[in-house]
Each structure stands twice: as structure tokens, then as C-alpha cells.
Amino acid sequence: MYKSFRVKNFRCFKDLQINDLGRVNLIAGKNNTGKTALLEAMHVLAGTYSGQVLLRNPGLRRALLRPENESETRNQLSWSTIFFGLNTSLAIELSASERIPNRTMDKSQSRIELSIQSVSFSNDTDDESRYKSFGYQYDVLPDDTDILKLCPSLDGRPTYLALIHSGIVYPRLKPSRFRPSQLLHARTGASARDIERRFNRIQKAKKIDALVTALELIEPRIKDVRINTDGWLSHLMTDIGLDYMIAMSESGEGMNRLSDIILAMHEAKGGIIFIDEIENGIHHSVQNKIWKTIGEVARELDIQVFATTHSLEMIRAAYEAFTEAGRLDEFRYHRLSESRKTGGLRATTYNELDLEALAAFDFDHEVR
Amino acid sequence: MDELIPEGKTRILLVEGSDDRVFFDRFVNHLAETSDAQFNVTELSIIEYGGRDKLTLRLRELKKADNFELVTHMGIVRDSDFNTDAFRSVQDRIKTVNNDGPPHIQVPNQPSVPSANVPQVSVLIVPSVEREGMLDDLVMEALTIDPIASCVNEYFNCLQSAEVQVVPERETKAKIRTFLIAKNVDRATAVSGITDRLFLSDAYETSLWQEHHLWESPALQETRDFLTQLLD
């Protein structure tokens, strides 16, 4: 479980440190303060053994495959969009201190780091060996290929990704097994393949009841959830007491969102889940109960949760839910903002005492 | 969420409640209008903390607020209530939130004397360090320059001799209200407006204070000095 996290030279972050992380973390802030970028950075670090996470993340993938200048062609794609200020001369540095459960005090802390550098073959003195290590024949990649080098602290061996005209190539990526982690995006739901894999997992673990119980918060008539693998796309079906089951996609956004969250949490057992704009589709009347459910599942499966929100109601609901459950110590609220003093983005963390102070004034202010 | 410390506000005045907020807002404006000195009124934000029991919570919230790092002056106003050690109580509350970690809020050594370092922190106890009471008592004292105040005091003495029970905690508020009604007895609409409300802040909404130069009352000298330090 991350205890603190630092990101340098990534997206909008020149240097941001976030401390005192809890089991469940809610991140808020005005527009363009880096909430999604922070989730992306943490998600990339969680998959530090390889660059797969970098590529699996649709937001990052879109950024990478979009030319800096729309008039440019794909041949001129650059990694620069993920570097702070488009400046590829400084490495992206991601690091976290972790608390490892069930260890003695002196071995309970560890540190993981990932450095991401943009390197150029044309400027490299040892091009041929680099090409070979990359796994390609010497003449496959053009001279001006943009290479991204990922150096994790844990096994020390770098991974190389290359941007070519047809996209990104990554010949020697190992599966990411460092930390089970899932990122749920604000706008796009889980893919059919993800849903099928996650549902099969929850089915094997005999935890479908947990999914049904959670979905009851939104649809009290729900009795069962199944997966339909007929046809070319698998999809979930719900039994709401009718003579036939109906597709989950026919239900409202809230049902699908909560289903995605619960399924992803079960797949991330022992790891981390990132949820962007958690309030999407969730009516305020059930937010409290959904936070209680997320807290319970996170505890049961030993998951750390990072969620972002624009909603003050969601912040209040989370505070009340964890207070009512007697688990406020597990919850942290982090606010991203721009420092008027330094101009950079910073994170302000609210622990139990700070949250009680915010709640005393109803999370609002009386000012002149 | 609104910002607790809006952009550009580098001076903070923490007051107990809405009555206090209106009083100090009017007082600050009066100082700005009548003084030759240049007061930084536009940099001031007056923030309620909801009474002495919530001061710790508000300080804790302030420390985490955006723009707190830019605050240069901070004033805290507290009623002495029935506690002659109200100043020490404020000191203790600042120390409590400092135990949470940085940023640290300066702990002033004496009432009405700002701490040495930035942000300068100053604490005003009303009606005064030596006397039990609240802001209302200070206001009533200022009102004594008007002859009606003595009539009001005599009236309440009369009530006492007639064995009418006046709750001690409410007596000053009742006197001020009586004063306002007496002062406005020839203005039907004003009387109606005032009697429909209970709060001291109504007093400052009237032109009463400007008409009678009550802000210049000697009873408010310490408060005037405190605000001058905060704004200068």
C-alpha cells in the first residue's frame, strides 16, 4: 500500500509530493489541477516492471498517439506529450514509499521508483547494441524513432518503447505483475473483454453475491447477475424479477459504473484501484452507501483505492460514510491546487482531525 | 467549494459569530473612511469560527487552506465570557493545531500584542482581558456616550427592583435592543424592523453609529488599536 507518492516532470506536474495516503483516498481539485494525471502516474508506477500500463491506459495512449501539432503526421509522433512542459530532456520520475503488511517494523517500509526517459537512437553512441536489446533488427526502426526508456528500481533492467508511424512497439514487455492495479476511466466503461475476465474471476471466487448486494443499492429489485457469452461481445445480464434477464447496458449509468467498480476491485485484490470521477452516474442519495461498500470491499480484499471527484456532495458522503462506519482513520481527502507562492501544483491532505474541522463548517466557508 | 481565504486576502480576522463579523466589518470600514493612514482593507478577510469551541477546528482548516502561505497578519477576537483566562485558552488552541505539524501559527505572548514573526498573530479579548463578558458588553459601554444609555440602565435597575427576572447572559443584548427601540421610537418602520430581529448586528445596519460617532468612543480604543495593527 502506497504511503506517499512523488511525481516529477509528468504531464502537468513539475514536482508533486502527496503524503499520508490512506486505504481509501479521494482526490479533488479545480479543473486542470491534475487529478486524472495523478491517477495515471500512480497507475504507471504500479506496473513498474513494464511499460504495459503506460499503453493500456487509454488517456495516456491517446496522448501519445496524438501529434503535438495536428498538422504533423504520425511519423512525427513524440513522447513529449507526457513530459512536463513537453520538455523531454528531463526524465519523468515516479516514486512511492510503501507499507508492507505483516512485516516487522524495520522491514515494513520499502521504496519503488520508476524513471522514464526519452532517448534518441540517432544521438546514441551504441545504436546497434541498443537496437538489439530492443529486440529489433538494426534496420527496422528509422533513425529518428522516438524511444522511451523505462528504468524501474526493482529489477533494474530497462524496458524500451518505440513510437513508429503505425503506433507504439514494445517487443520485450513482460506481463505487469508488480502490483495488481486497475484504472477506471471517467467517461469510458470497461471493455467487453475486461468485463468477461473480471466476471469470470468473481464467479470463480463465489463472490457474485457481493456484486448483487452492491448493485441493490441502485436497483433494489436485482436478484442475480450473469454473463452472456453468446455473440461476438460478452455482456452482463441482470435478473430484476422479470420473466427474462435484461442486459446490464440497458440499465442506467450508475448501475454500470458501480458494476465496473466492484468487478475491478475483485480483480485488483491485494493491489490498487484507481477510479476517475467516481461520482459519474451516482445519485447523491446512494453515495453514502456506495462509499461504505467500497470501504468494506477494500478492507476485505486488501485494496488501496484512489478516486477523483468534482463533487462536494461526494466528499461529504465519503466523510459521513467512513465516520458512520467508525473507519475514518482509513480515509484521506487530498486537494490538488496551484500554489500562489510557487506557481506549481501541490497536494493538501486531510486526515481525521482535518476532516472533522472541515465537517464542523459543513465543508463550506463563511467569508467576508 | 468556496475558498476559505480568497485570493488577494493576506490579512485574516477570526471572529466568533455573525454579530461580531458585522461589527468588525463596519468598524474596519469606518477606520478606512476616517483615518489619514492607508489601511489595507481590501486585503482583509473576516472569517467566523462559530464560538470558542470551534476555534481549534477553524484554525486547523485555515492551516490547510489555499493562500494561507500568503497570509501576513492574523487577528483572533474572542469573548472573555466567564473565563478570565480566555487569552491563554486561545494560546492553547494555537499550540494544539501546531502539534498537527507545519505550517505553524505564531503564538502571541500577550493580548493585543502581535507576535514577532510573519504571519503576525494578535489576539483581542473582549470586552477586555480583565473583565468577563462579550462583545455586547463592549458595545454597551461605547453606547454610554449617548444619554439614552443611562435611561436604559435605569430601566433595567427598575426591572430588577420589581423582581423581573432577566437572564444574566441575555441582559446586555436586551439593553442594546431596548436602546435601539428607544433611539428609533419616532421612526415607525425602523422600530418594526428592529423589533422583528434579535441580533446585535442590526445595530450596525442602522445609521446610529455614524450619526453619533460611537466608533470614536474611548471604550473602543483597544479594539481600534488592534485593528490598526492588523491593517497597517
Image (cartoon, coloured by chain):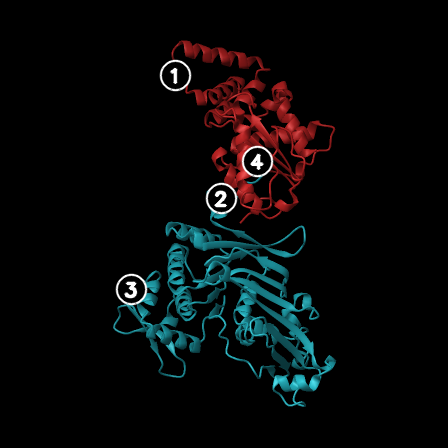
Chain colours: A cyan, B red
Residue B125 image position (x, y, % from top left)? 56, 27
Instruction: Tell me: B180 left or right of B217.
Output: left
Badge 4 density bin: few <14, some 14–19, many ≥20, Cα 10 Å:
many
Q: Chain of mark 2?
A: A
Q: Nearer the viewer, mark 3 or mark 4?
A: 4
Q: Circle 2 sits on which residue? A: A357
Labels 1 and 3 share a subunit:
no
As helix, strand or loop, the secondary structure at mark 3 comes to loop
Mark 3 — residue?
Answer: A221
State the residue in front, A300 or B31.
A300
Tell me: residue B183, above or below residue A26.
above
Residue identifier under label 1? B165
Asked whether residue A43 is in view, the answer is yes
Q: How far apart are the alpha carbons under marks 4 and 2? A: 15 Å
- Is there one chain holding both mark 1 and mark 4? yes
Vertical order, B142 against A90 (above or below): above
Question: Which chain does the numbered disc 3 sit on?
Answer: A
Query: Label 4 lies in what chain?
Result: B
Indicate which disc, 1 or 4, sits on the residue closer to the N terminus.
Answer: 4
Looking at numbered disc 1 in the image, what kind of residue is underneath it? Gln
- Front label number (4 vs 2): 2
- Reading the chain from its start, which is encountered first: label 3 or label 2? 3
- CA gap between label 1 and label 3 equals 62 Å
Q: Amino acid at mark 2?
A: Ala
SS for dot 2? helix
Marks 1 and 3: CB-CB under 8 Å?
A: no
Residue at the spot x=55%, y=63% of the render?
A: A96
- For the residues labelled 3 and 4, the Cα–Cα distance comes to 52 Å
The answer to whether marks 3 and 4 sit on the same chain is: no
- Point out the image quarter for the C terminus of chain A: top right
